[in-house]
Amino acid sequence: MEKAANNIKWMEKTVLEEKTTATTNTVSGNTGNDEVLRVNNLVKYFPIKSSFFKRTIGNVKAVDGVTFSIKRRQTMGLVGESGCGKSTCGRTILRLQEKTSGDVWFDGQDVFALSKEELRKLRPRMQMVFQDPYSSLSPRLPVGEIIGEAAREHHIVDSENYDDYISRVMEVCGLPSYYKERYPHEFSGGQRQRICIARSLALAPDFVVCDEPVSALDVSIQAQIINLLKQLQQEFGLTYLFISHDLSVVEHISDTVGVMYLGNMVEYAETEKIFANPLNPYTKALFSAIPVPDPDVKLNRIILKGSIPSPANPPSGCKFHTRCDHCMEMCKYAVPEWKEVEEGHFCACHLYNGDEENARANETVKEAKRTATVTVDTEVM
């Protein structure tokens, strides 16, 4: 324990000294001292090409207007069914793929407005832990090189202290330094995920996207990795976007939670609020599936009808209306507005419309029906 404590103190002194803490404040993008990330109406579409002429005949709407923010030293959980756009959202935020539209502000800087050189300087501060520890590590490199390659490239540490630096980073992540000469195939899934975390930590990041980092691991190993992430956050002031479909894990590690459905954010609030009082019907159905380790507790499971629509051809209006028991006429035509239902608790659902929202939704319904009638009359003629 004493050795581990010394390692953490060493990391605080050496790694954190490398961080760039200056915030660039602009009129349109100032995130404030308490926010490290702000995402505003982020959209990412993937074009569908025809098989012969390679023309764009449609789009897969993977992320379709997502808005949220994350405060420093906090963890935001991003949950939803498989295919809802969680991982695409995380990768787009880090600019691992280009956006279609929207804004991403990291510490006051517009990520997508940066030049290649500016983005390269920012890269060490924004890192990612990938979902699959088996395919995200190069089988040709020893562990020491995997962890230290990017740190050396970005000049995080000089050549004289390089070897000792990598050893310290590994020990902080629960990896003995003599593992440096071994290769990924010699390790278990939990150890490989520790290597992935150490690779990110070696760059002294401020913000880390954790893309389902424990989904491929056994339950006992999951607990170890989650506790490691929480310890590193406490010691080094990290901010996490924790992407997962395991709601029990999200509830344990997150300060705030966002719920996605078919590319849209449908609800966002502090963890305690959203688990105690979910508002959106989709969120209620999702949370009702959380297993309770008590045989005497009867679960009030909400079974959703149908299957998830195609993101290439989503339903009009509210995308969830085809599976919702509370579906109204306006849900089929009008997109629900993103609004703050209670302090700090945001939701997109017509059930919580005020008079103004209802008026706009009803007007959209009338316009849609008018357009449909004109189209039918034209086809008949």
Image (spheres, rainbow, N blue to C red):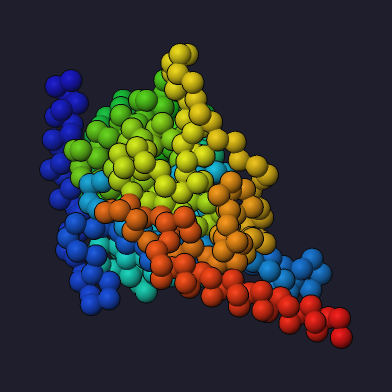
Image height of 296 relative to 8, above or below: above
Task: Name the image quarter holding the N terminus.
Answer: top left
Residue 344 rendering spot, x and y as whole percentages: 28, 53
Task: Name the image quarter holding the C terminus.
Answer: bottom right
Judged left or right of residue 33, residue 348 is right
The residue sitting at 48% across, 51% down in the picture is 260
Identify the image quadrant of residue 273.
top left
Kindly tell me whether residue 3 is visible in this rendering: yes
The residue sitting at 81% across, 69% down in the picture is 52
Judged left or right of residue 73, residue 134 is right
Residue 369 rendering spot, x and y as whole percentages: 66, 74
Residue 347 rendering spot, x and y as whole percentages: 41, 55
Judged left or right of residue 88, residue 254 is left
The residue sitting at 33% across, 70% down in the picture is 110
The residue sitting at 43% across, 16% down in the picture is 294
Judged left or right of residue 299, residue 328 is right
Kindly tell me whether residue 183 is visible in this rendering: no
Closer to the camera, 309 or 1?
Answer: 309
Closer to the camera, 136 or 41?
Answer: 41
Image height of 203 relative to 102, above or below: above
Closer to the camera, 194 or 101?
Answer: 101
Residue furthest toward the top?
A: 295
Image height of 308 relative to 365, above or below: above
Residue furthest toward the right?
A: 381
Residue 124 rendering spot, x and y as whole percentages: 31, 55
Image height of 325 relative to 115, above or below: above
Identify the image quadrant of residue 330.
bottom right
Closer to the camera, 379 or 152?
Answer: 379
